[in-house]
Image: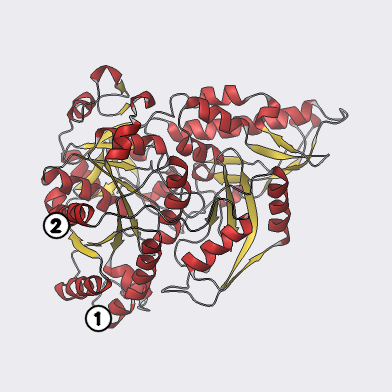
Amino acid sequence: MKTDIEIARSIKLRKIKKIATQIDIPVEEVLNYGKYIAKIPVNLIDEEKVKKNNLILVTAITPTKAGIGKTTVSIGLALGLEKIGKRAIVALREPSLGPCFGMKGGAAGGGYAQVLPMENINLHFTGDFHAVTSAHNMITALLDNYLYQNQGVCGVGLREILWKRVLDVNDRSLRQIVTGLGPRTNGIPTETGFDITPASEIMAILCLSKDIDDLKRRVGEILLGIDYEGKPFKVKDLKIEGSIAVLMKDAIHPNLVQTTENTAAFIHGGPFANIAHGCNSILATKMALTFGEYVITEAGFGADLGAEKFFNIKCRKAGLQPKLTVIVVTSQALKMHGEVPVNDIKKPNRGGFIKGFENLDKHIDNIQKMGQSIVVAFNKYAFDTDEEISLLKEHCTEKGVGFAVNNAFAEGGDGAIDLANTVVETIENKPSAPLHFTYDENDPIKVKIEKIAKEIYGAEAVQFSDKAERILKIAHEMGIEHFPVCIAKTQYSFSADAKQYGVAKGFKLKINDIVINNGAEFIVAIAGEIMRMPGLPKVPNAVNIDIVNGQIEGLS
């Protein structure tokens, strides 16, 4: 079979205005970024159509390090729905350069279920990530300048700085640094560090804002530090929220591209789900719901991370009600959670495969508790056996959830027709109930964290470090206990231990730090050893990426 990039190049792309007119977007509203990419103005969103059309979430069981194929399934499902005569649009996150050059090599789907032009989407795209990075670091520079220019001025200064810098690169050396060294004119020496751009609060604000005015308001509320009187110091205290919003004026509009079968796709925003809230922008999802009968979106990593945050943060804030949740499963992931050594998970192993059902069942139970109807999608690989598929189908029948095989990677939309039919039939006959959130908005922050840890992860207890307790006190004093919470933890386990596969039990979840995202209006609780700036593997994917005779190679 051809590589992803070879398949992508073999597809004859349609001009982006043609894609827009296919879904009834007025051609005069299309803001071209070349021939095959465009931004669509947010004023086209129609809230009545948003409420009427069908939103489908694609999530997964706890993934392997190679991923689990949620993006491929999401795109494949959209293609399959189109094959059976439905107008379907997929709405996804933008890839980060960190994983592209680090572990994954790309994040635009795979095989014959991709969003195109994949090279552009994976590499800079329309500059949204750069806008987020620039806006975030502009705030940092202006804060540093404010402190430098006002040294010694009575009543001016910060007792504690809570704002760092970001960069869309995996760079462990930048996690903890000192700035301002050298002569006095270089600034004030400060211990600080970098997060990766998908963890930026500006990225979260982009994905949760309803328009540019809301974005500007949220930017003004960003908490930068605590002054010497113990009061919060925010971006609006620098009087720069307007200038930061200017940097984001184009980034706020969703990006329109196309699939391998020339159907419409919106790609916008890119927070990770292990260290951020893991969903594409509300604006892109609502734009897709304005123009599509069925809209498929995904939330990052396993359902304990992405889906939980999708429901408790994104849907709560945007008023979205998904009609169905698809849980993606692979044989490799099931075997890994069934105690099969990672090097052997591509080999047949009936016992390990069946034992892995425990991990799937925990995710099913979690999603059902939140009121969702479920279809399990088996993401098929060439080495999977008919016996394995039959075993999983039988198990899903016993659990009372839908089941279908997704083979869109190899066959495009034709390989997802069964999945599409199962999804439509489930929505028509057994749509999801209104969302039942894991916690109440008025629960204290600690209680919210404990409810997620115990009810979703299965933790026995939650421990808070002294630092976390101190930040929680600040949050209480700021009157923001009503904010939802976003737990940052490893994606490879229900616990904070990345190697505790299956269904972790009897563990204590330790919250080492709390980050107040006052502009994004949620609280980040950092569990275990998770890093908001990832590192690179021993052999990063960057060694495979090249440009040969004017063509990019090595993306997948």
Across and down, in percent, residue 419 comes to 18, 56
Q: Residue at x 77, y 39 (%)?
A: 231
Residue situated furthest bottom in the rendering: 351
Residue type highlighted by circle 2? Asp
Give the quarter of the image for residue 120.
top left
Residue 266 is at least partly visible in this image: no
Q: Is residue 40 above or below residue 281?
A: above
What is the crowding at mark 2: few (fewer than 14 residues within 10 Å), some, or many (at least 20)? many
**Which label lies toward us, 2 or 1?**
2
Across and down, in percent, residue 29 comes to 30, 19
Residue situated furthest top in the rendering: 28
Name the N-terminal-most of marks 2 and 1.
1
> Mark 2 and mark 1: span between their CA atoms?
25 Å
SS for callout 1: helix
Residue type highlighted by circle 1? Arg
What is the crowding at mark 1: few (fewer than 14 residues within 10 Å), some, or many (at least 20)? some
Across and down, in percent, residue 67 comes to 35, 59
The residue tagged 2 is 418
The residue tagged 1 is 350
Q: Is residue 276 above or below residue 361?
A: above
Q: Residue at x 62, y 55 (%)?
A: 445
Q: Residue at x 35, y 45 (%)?
A: 545
Relative horizontal placement of residue 251, taking residue 392 as reference (left or right): right
Q: Quadrant of the N terminus?
A: bottom left
How many marks overall?
A: 2
